[in-house]
Image (cartoon, rainbow, N blue to C red):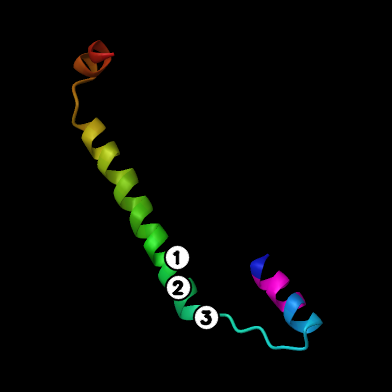
Amino acid sequence: MGIGVGNLAGSALNATAAIPYDWVLIGLILCVVVGLIFGTYPAYKAANLDPIEALRYE
């Protein structure tokens, strides 16, 4: 959607729209790494709990 809007704005202004593909790739990799870290660690921690003790805590 952002690429489409950028291309439309570029054509309306008679300019070329440049997409920094390296920054797009860096952003995607960073988001994947953060998602994996903050999703895997709590799941690993919860998987090592005793179910009875985990339910009793709440």
Q: Which residue is mark 2?
A: 25
* Vertical placement of residue 42 versus 18, above or below: above
What's the distance in space between the residues labelled 1 and 3, CA to CA?
Answer: 13 Å
Q: Write down the residue under mark 3.
A: 20
* Residue sitting at x 68%, y 65%: 1
Give left or right: position of 32 versus 13: left
| Residue 39, numbered circle | none
Q: Foreground mark, 2 or 3?
A: 3
Q: Residue at 41% across / 59% down in the picture?
A: 31
Q: Is residue 40 left or right of residue 53?
A: right
x then y, percent, for residue 22? 45, 79
Q: Nearer the viewer, residue 47 or 58?
A: 58
Q: Is residue 1 left or right of residue 31?
A: right
Mark 1 or mark 3, whichever is nearer to me = 3
Residue 35 on image: x %, y %: 38, 51
- In the picture as drawn, the residue positioned furthest to the top comes out as 56
Q: Residues under labels 2 and 3: Cα distance?
A: 9 Å
Q: Residue 42: which quarter of the image? A: top left
- Crowding at mark 1 (Cα within 10 Å: few <14, some 14-19, many 20+): few
Q: Is residue 41 magenta?
A: no
Magenta stretch: give its range.
3-8
Which three-letter amino acid code belongs to the residue tagged 3? Pro
Q: Are marks 1 and 2 in contact (CB under 8 Å)?
A: yes
At horizontal 35% and vertical 54% (from top left) the residue drawn is 34
Label 3 secondary element: loop
State yes or no: residue 4 in magenta. yes
